[in-house]
Amino acid sequence: MPKAGFKSITISEEVYNRFHDVYKKSKHELAMKGVNSFAGYITYMMEDLMQKDDTFARYAPKLEKISVDGDRVVIKDNIKNRIAEVAVQNNELYCLLCEEKNCVHVGFVFSLPEIYEVLNARGIKHQR
């Protein structure tokens, strides 16, 4: 029975082990972000995913991924009726249309799971 104010969930042992392995390997980096327990790590991951899903839900109808080519993602901006190109420059994402590092197009690129995984593995973080 969980403590007051908490809920418990049931997941498969395989999923638990996969997340726990990542947590153990990333413990030092996570501690720097204020994540000091496995439960805290799961909460952190869930909140991060919900934020990405929220960003995707807000902008998906307005923005569409056209292609990915190396260090560039081409996006169709249906509001501006323009094509936006987001590229990696100086180990950061940069929107060539807006000429910014923190615009809706950059946020959209970070919300794409397949792109986020590659960026995260390269140590490229979203400037919030």
Image (cartoon, rainbow, N blue to C red):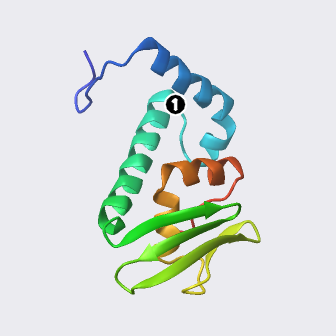
- For this rendering, which residue is in front, 85 or 103? 85
Q: Give the residue type that dot 1 points to.
A: Ser
Q: Is residue 12 above or below residue 121?
A: above
Q: Is residue 36 above or below residue 91?
A: above
Q: Is residue 102 above or below residue 107?
A: below
Which image quarter holds the N terminus?
top left
**Residue 124 on image: x %, y %:** 67, 58
Instruction: Answer with the quarter of the image where residue 58 lies.
Output: bottom left
In the picture provided, is 80 more to the left or to the right than 30?
A: left
At horizontal 50% and vertical 28% (from top left) the residue drawn is 38
- For this rendering, which residue is in front, 113 or 101? 113
**Which residue of the protein is positioned furthest toward the right in this rendering?**
90
**Residue 91 on image: x %, y %:** 74, 65
Provide the secondary structure element on which disc 1 rests.
loop
User: Where is mark 1, residue-wise?
Assistant: 37
At horizontal 45% and vertical 34% (from top left) the residue drawn is 42
**Residue 101 on image: x %, y %:** 60, 77
At horizontal 72% and vertical 52% (from top left) the residue drawn is 122
At horizontal 50% and vertical 78% (from top left) the residue drawn is 103
- For this rendering, which residue is in front, 97 or 94? 97
Instruction: Answer with the quarter of the image where residue 31 lies.
Output: top right
